[in-house]
Every structure is written in structure tokens, then in C-alpha cells.
Amino acid sequence: MAKFKVKDLKLAEQGKLKIQWAESRMPVLAALRAKYKKTKPFKGFKIAGCLHVTKETAVLIKTFIDAGAELSWSGCNPLSTQDDVAAALAKDGVSIYAWHGMNTKEFYWCIDRTLDFKPHLTLDDGADLIFTVHKKYKNLIPNIIGGTEETTTGVHRLRKMAEKGALKYPVFAVNDMITKWDFDNVYGTGQSSIDGILRATSVLIAGKNFVVAGYGHCGSGVANKAKGLGANTIITEVKPTAALKGTLEGHEVMKMDEAAKTGDIFITATGVKDVITGKHFQNMKDGAIVCNTGHYDCEINITDLEKLKKSKRTIRPNCEEYTLKNGNRIYLLAKGRLVNLSAAEGHPSEVMDMSFANQFNAQLALVNSYKSGKKYSIDVHKLPDSMDQDIAGVKLSTMGMKIDKLTKEQIMYNDDFSAGT
């Protein structure tokens, strides 16, 4: 029997329905399942996964299982696990260690358990699993073929590891695929972050001064969704090109010190610590809402907020009211963790379909390289552009859309460097 620890197995039936809903909206993964169900390319290979336990992740897990893999799984965020989905997976025989509301010690205990069966591959969102292997389980590294990383923050940290020679096995940067970050990060984060804010507060977005810290793929997605709902959008940035892009796309740009005085809703999407600190809380309006959609909860300095408070109470699910010593009230959502996964359900299934197809293909590339005897070098690798086009092509076909193809003459023209005016 599979080993597991989840909140409550009685939630399994509800989770099963959620998974079935996601399956009906993830045709790219369905195509991969159909393609590899008979050949089972992952047979004999063990995958340790550390990724948000959502209905979409469950579809990815089932795809791996149908392709022959053995898995052990944990959530990559203490507040993002959907307990009913975790229960459904456990009841179906998946070794899973995840529940909503775990503390830091429990979080890493769960990661430890996924490594008990000595995996050949790791699958990450944020790189906590990879870091745990490198810090605590170096003895497992000779057995590991490689890993994959889902998110911007994790890829950034892994590239720093590789630069310093600290990375000990190859990793694919799934996040860097066009069919991941131009869709999941932009449209997924944009919609699901707004969804989380609305579920936690039920406020009207229209007319609010909506401050987005960071105008990368995720931040731009949030800002443009908020603007579409009628908000007055303000961007804070440290990168001139990103700030300029935000300006030309219709957002006001200012420093956080100034934005703090005028904002009604604040959301961080930077991957950097201490974006909103004590001095900003002190300057905020009474009733300001503060949340985060970056991977880690360090973007908002909650320690500073605690020091400034006169009192605190939970006023709604995922919404804590901090009354400051100056009398103003600040509303912190989802304890500063990912608001889209802690207060809502994460990205829609349709967009995660492509992201998780990339995860599957990246893991398969590692397995195939091992089988062929041509292992990848120890580095952070990018998947080929052709894979992006294949995934996008399948997605378009499932949506009933067709696109043009270059003619032979057009291909020849593109390759002819001698052609001029």
C-alpha cells in the first residue's frame, strides 16, 4: 500500500470530482496520456514531486502514472494544498504527503518523506526539493538522473547554484518555455490572483488604486487584469525596461514609498524580500489590503507589521485585520503567501494544461537521455523551441483553430541570406 499523510480521506469523493473537472479541460495532457499509456516510457523510474497539490497537479500525476512512473509527492507551499484533491490521490494509491495549513517543520517533513523511496527524478516548484536533496540527502544524488523546475523563483535560484558549481545534477527550466511563462505566468497568475483577492475580501476592484510590485510576466498579468476590471493601476519596479513597458501599457509608475500613500490594494510579484516593509505600512490608508503572489512569503515583511500592530483578528477566511498603533487598519491576505493558491484554487486548468505538458516532456527527455546513454551536463537547461510549438499546436487544435503554414518558396526565402531589395 502507498504511504501517505493527508488531512482527511473522507474528502476523497469531492476531490475526485474536482480532478474530473480539470481533466475535461486539459486536452494536451490527455493527448500525452493516450500516447504513452501503452508504451509506458517511465516504467522502472521513480519521481519525487514537490508542487502545489491542486486538481490540475492531480491530472499531471495521473498522466505520469499512466506512463509507468512511480511517484511520491508533497505540496510546495504550506497553504496551497487542496485537501480534497490530496485525499483523492491518496485513496487512489498515490504516496502523497500534503495538507493545507502545515507549519514549516511539517512542510520539510513532507519533502523528506518523498525522498524515502530514493527517486531517479525530481520535479519542483520553487526548488525546495532540490535544495533538500543537496543539503540533507547528498547520498541520493548519484541515483538521480535530473530534475525539472516550474517557477521563476526556483529557476533563478538554481541558475545561481549552477554558476557557483553547487548544482550536482541537470535540471530543466520548465518556466522558461513560452507555453509556460507567456500563458501560465501572465494569464494564469493574473486571473487567479484577482480571484484570491475577491474570495478573501469581496471588494470592488473598479475605482481602486491597485499597486503591483514587479512588472515581470506575473506582475504584468495581474496589473492588466486589474486594469480590465476598472482599477487605477500603479506599478513599482527596480528594472528600467520593465517600468517603461508598464508605462507604455497604460499603468502609472512610481516608487513604493509614494505608492504606499495612495494605494487601496497592494500585491507583490517580485521574487525579492522586503518589498513592503514597516515604513510602507505606516504610510498606508486606513483599510488598505496587502497580499503577495510571489512564490515565497518574504516579499511582505510581516515581522514589521506585527511590531506596528495594536491588535489583530481574523475577520474573514484568509483575511487578517491588523489595527496599527496609529489607528489605521491593514488587511493582510493569506498570511502573505501566494494569494492565488491560498485564498483561491490557483491557475485555471486550461492554462496549466500547457505548463504541465512541459513538465511531462522535460521529465521524459531526462529519461530518454538516460536510456540512450547520453546524459545531460550538470546545468540548468532549456527545452527546445520545437517543443513549445508542438504543445501550442495541440492546444490550438483542441480549441478548433487552424493556422497557416509557410510555403516551400517562403521557407527558401527565409533561408536565403543573399536576398535584398
Image (cartoon, rainbow, N blue to C red):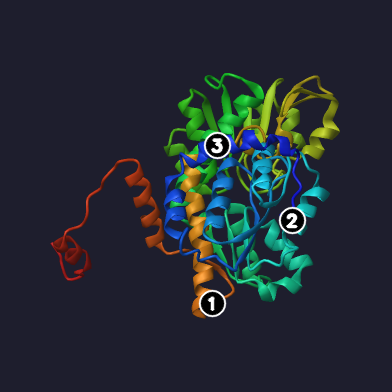
The picture quadrant where one finds residue 99 is: top right
Give the Cα distance between marks 1 and 3: 43 Å
Q: SS for tag 1?
A: loop
* Element type where label 3 sits in the image: strand
Q: Residue 418: x, y in percent?
A: 17, 71
Neighbours of disc 1 within 10 Å: few (<14), some (14-19), many (20+): some
Q: Earlier in the sequence, mark 2 or mark 3?
A: 2
Question: Which of the labelled discs sits on residue 111, or is there none?
Answer: 2
In the image, residue 132 above or below residue 254: below
Q: Residue at x 52, y 59 (%)?
A: 67
x and y, in percent, of residue 319 in the image: 72, 27
Spot occupied by residue 130 in the image (x, y as percentages of width and height): 68, 62
SS state under label 2: helix
State which tag comes first along the sequence, 1 or 2: 2
Going from the N terminus, do you reach mark 1 or mark 3 first?
Answer: 3
- Residue 421 is situated, as x and y percent measured from the top left of the image, at 13, 62
Look at mark 3 in the image and give the residue it sits on.
Answer: 235
- Relative to 324, is 84 on the left or the right? left
Q: Is residue 348 visible?
A: no
Residue 102 as seen in the image, left or right of residue 70: right
Query: How many marks can you see?
Result: 3
Q: Amino acid at mark 2?
A: Ile
Q: Nearer the viewer, residue 220 or 190?
A: 190
Per the model, the C-alpha gap separating discs 1 and 2 is 26 Å
Mark 1 in CB contact with mark 3 (< 8 angstroms):
no
258 or 32, which is in the foreground?
32
Q: Which amino acid is tagged 1?
A: Lys
Residue type of the residue flagged with mark 3:
Ile
Residue at horizontal 61 percent and vertical 31 percent from the top:
196
Question: Foreground mark, 2 or 3?
Answer: 2
Residue placed under numbered mark 1 in the picture? 375
